[in-house]
Amino acid sequence: MRIIISNQSELPIYAQIREQLKEQILSGQIEEGSVLPSIRQLAKETGVSVITTTRAYSDLEAEGFIATMQGKGSVVLAKDNSVVREQYLMRIEEGLTTAIETARAMGLSEEELTEIFQNLLHTPGAD
Amino acid sequence: MELLEVHGVSKRYKDFQLENIDFVLPKGYIMGYVGQNGAGKSTTLNLIVNLCKCTEGEIYVDGIACGEDEIRYKERIGYIGDEFYYPTNFTVRNIQGILKSFYPSFDEDRFGAFLERWKLADKMKVKDFSRGMRVKLMFASVLARETKLLVLDEATNGLDPVARAEVIGLMQEYIADGERSVIFSTHILSDLEQIADYIFFIDDGKKVFCDTKDQLLERYVLVKGERRDVTPQLAGELIGIIDTAYGFSALADRERTGLLTKEFLCDKATIDEIVVHYAQDKAKNGRRRML
Amino acid sequence: MRAIHFTKIDFLSTKQQLKAFPFIAALFGLICVWQSKTSGNESGVMGIMVYVIFLAITFSGTPFGACRSIDARFLMILPADATSRVAGRFLYGLSLLGMAAACAAVIGAVGCAFGIGFSAAHAAIWLLGLEIGVMLVTLEYTFLYLFGEAQGPYMLNIVRVVPAMIFFFTGYNLAGELTRETGGALLLSGEVVRILYRAGACGAVLAAALVCGAIRLCARVMRGRDY
């Protein structure tokens, strides 16, 4: 687990924590079923206030990434959860929208764009 | 569970009044007490540690009022003031002996560990200590016993950045088990801003704001731009406009930034900036605004 | 119990000043012995007590000087009630008087070794002197608690010195008068000795009552006072 807080960031601190945890859960760096550090522990380690950390966790809980159980701490939920799927779909849409907008801006035709998409899709090891 | 309850507290002096201060601090949280010099920060903290007596109102620490049981009340509090309060002709060992005789929970080993960590020689007289060493000694003496509430009145003044960072870590460690709380006042907000859960902003003896820090920081944005772009309508929305040679900065309610056009830059505001613009607003309009 | 800890703090914080106490007491005590020996009258014997009590009264105000504002905060944050804090201070003053009495006893013993007469009447006068010392210190402390701390160092010095001076001059003159008029014969009369002892007993009760009353009064005032 890795959390880096920036004072220059546009995002408020609780959102930075939330996004970074989300990122790592989605990418599998934080495995499902693993227990996150307690709110107070995380606050202490990152030098952030308890309330700020609490907010990050409750956001993650509301979005269905983690579940907090009494006495057990916060557990990372499985990713096939529909809420998480929703998150993934949103990200895919976001990425594709950017691509489409860029293509339109430079006047690329629809065929050419689909071709790039197809090529990338079949290139082994592509990100 | 509330650890510190301050109910309708007033204190009247000839030339200054603290009026109707009312707040609670739950167990396991840190509160920053913020305001200008002479706003009433020290007065409030002195009332909490019972160095001064309230003219009106009640204060409870861990459910105990000082008038009920002064000994148990004071045992629960660790106070560090802006001035060194140990007699300066004492040696560290003298102080240790006195603390041991007054506090059953005083742990000499823990005290010794702090002395070693901060290189405070226990045979030395306190008057030969630097300001930083004195502050460290106060911290060591408070942290070496069981307390519930730390009251820090400008306590980190005079500490170098390394020691300040260390103290901040200690404060977070202190509240980590969720049973203890800290209330502090300070001028140097930047480093303590991050760890504070609640902010109480006091001005002229009266409350301006008291809520979670996140609430305060989220509510206000710092607007920067050129003065000629400010319409009269917009000027009414801006709080405490400060002009510089090449532009201005002001505070604005995040929900009322609709009038801001692309010419303006919106930035996150720090607590320092909020305090400064609040003061500017007051100076210009001659009235106090509630945040 | 906590009162004793406060007494300890007072002793620690005035240690520097107190160091001089036994030396000055010894020096002037021996001068008294010498004077008594050479002049042949007994005023010197009484002078010993007068002198050491005078010293004790002078020194008793020291913690009020040493513990201004910042030190007062230190005393006030310690977990104890106002009664312990005040009683601790009174105990400090009484201890000084006790020390003075001990010094006087030592000097008296030295005087005896040099052949100075010491009678039962002298002992009674010494006791009376001690009791008057207790009362004066009590009044001084009460005054300092009620009015002194706000007055600053100037007032403090006056209050410290005045009772000591009164004690010193009246005590010394009285001792002189007593011995000059009768050449000391008065003190040998059984009746006078009995009266002196009765006065001593009354004085003890009075002094004790005064101390208790003063502690209660000062504690009540201090309870409501800001540092």
Image (cartoon, coloured by chain):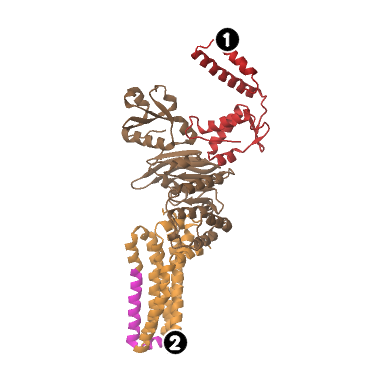
Q: Position of residue C184 (x, y in %)?
A: 37, 87
- Horizontal arrangement in the rendering, residue C138 relative to residue B176 (left or right): left
Q: Position of residue A90 (x, y in %)?
A: 59, 20
Q: Amino acid at mark 1?
A: Glu
SS at circle 2: helix
**Total numbered badges shown on the rendered structure:** 2
> With respect to residue B288, does C89 lie above or below?
below
The residue identified by callout 2 is C112
- Could one spot residue B212 in this view of the protein? no
Mark nearer the viewer, 1 or 2: 1
> With respect to residue B116, does B214 lie above or below?
above
Q: Position of residue A69 (x, y in %)?
A: 66, 34
Residue nearer the viewer, C101 or B250: B250
- Could one spot residue A95 in this view of the protein? yes
The residue identified by callout 1 is A111
Quarter of the figure that contains the N terminus of chain B: top right
In the figure, what tint was chain B given? brown
> With respect to residue A95, does B287 lie above or below?
below
Residue nearer the viewer, C157 or A127: A127
In the figure, what tint was chain C given? orange
Categorize mark 1 by other alpha carbons within 10 Å: few (<14), some (14-19), many (20+). few
Q: Amino acid at mark 2?
A: Cys
**Residue under the image location 39 percent in, 73 percent down:** C55
Quarter of the figure that contains the C terminus of chain B: top left
SS at circle 1: helix
Q: Is-magenta flag for residue C183?
A: yes
Q: Is-magenta flag for residue C4?
A: no
* Dominant secondary-structure state across the stretch colored magenta: helix
The reply to whether the C-beta atoms of the residues labelled 1 and 2 are less than 8 Å apart is no
In the figure, what tint was chain A given? red
Q: Which residues are magenta?
A: C161-190
